[in-house]
Amino acid sequence: MKKTWKKLGSLAAAGILTLSLAGCGGEKEGINAKVQQNLFDTSVATVETLVSYDKASMEQAIEENPNMDDFTKGAFTSWIDNCEELGAYLGMESDQSAATAVRMDSHKYIVTLNADFENRDAVVELVYSGKLAPESVGFSPNYSMGEKMQSAAVNTIIGIAIVFLMLLFLSFVISLMKYIPKLEAALTKKKASQTPAPAEKPAPVVAAPSEEELVDDGALVAVIAAAIAAAENTSTDAFVVRSIRKSNKRTWR
């Protein structure tokens, strides 16, 4: 654990060393040679300190230091993402110098280093602000032409496959369009069948003929009227027969 903290201190010291270069400044039309050389040396030292960490130590350092500065945290994260693919660090390529590695772009200093690793080489790019404050470190693995062609071929195949699958899906969706009218008709029919039919109005009840309705039989009325008149010892003009009902009584009074 002490070794890890020692390395972490070395990385922070490299960043602080860069800040000390701010006093050297830069020429109006180019980079001061001294600044250029100091940036190059500081960048090499920073990268060599960074790649000495293993993945577990960096993850632990990030977890245990929530207030870690952005530059250190970004550098750790970049190396964590690439350390397994690149492998162990072997050294910097010898054919590079401060004049070729350091340049200025949009008021920022860019240091590009070519480093050798166990699995594959990589380009390491460090960015500094106009005041020479370190901002970021990035690793870009170098791939052979064959690997690039293979990756491009895989990407092309994946792209064609996705397009082909999308066309198949669209064709399937279009083929379902013919079922839409049938589906609408079925839904309309189902909705109509579920709509309650209007209640039928009850047929008007025909009133039964009243029992008191006068029987349309003039002869019977005349006979009954004469019998009543004889029983009452009066004339048929003294009363009017309005209705004839059947009596439930068996005897007469």
Image (tube, grey):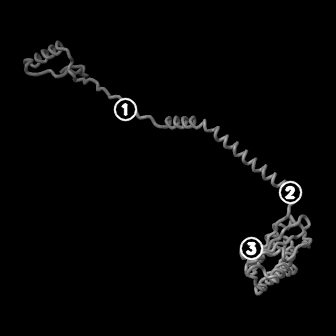
Q: Earlier in the sequence, mark 3 or mark 2?
A: 3
Is there any visible trace of residue 202 in the rendered image? Answer: yes
Q: Earlier in the sequence, mark 2 or mark 1?
A: 2
* Residue under label 2: 147
Q: Position of residue 183 (x, y in %)?
A: 57, 37
| Quarter occupied by the C terminus | top left
Is there any visible trace of residue 62 in the rendered image? Answer: no
Position of residue 108 in the picture relative to residue 194 (left or right): right
Foreground tag (3 vs 2): 3
* Residue under label 3: 105
The image quadrant of residue 34 is bottom right
Which secondary structure lies at badge 1? loop
What kind of residue is marked 2? Answer: Glu
Label ID, residue 201: 1
The Cα atoms of the two marked residues, 3 and 2, are separated by: 30 Å
Residue at point 32% right, 28% down?
Answer: 205
Considering every residue shown, the one lying at the far top of the view is 219
| Quarter occupied by the N terminus | bottom right
What kind of residue is marked 1? Answer: Lys
Position of residue 165 in the picture relative to residue 7 (left or right): left
The image quadrant of residue 91 is bottom right
Q: Position of residue 14 (x, y in %)?
A: 82, 81
Residue at point 17% right, 14% down?
Answer: 218
What kind of residue is marked 3? Answer: Asp
The Cα atoms of the two marked residues, 2 and 1, are separated by: 87 Å
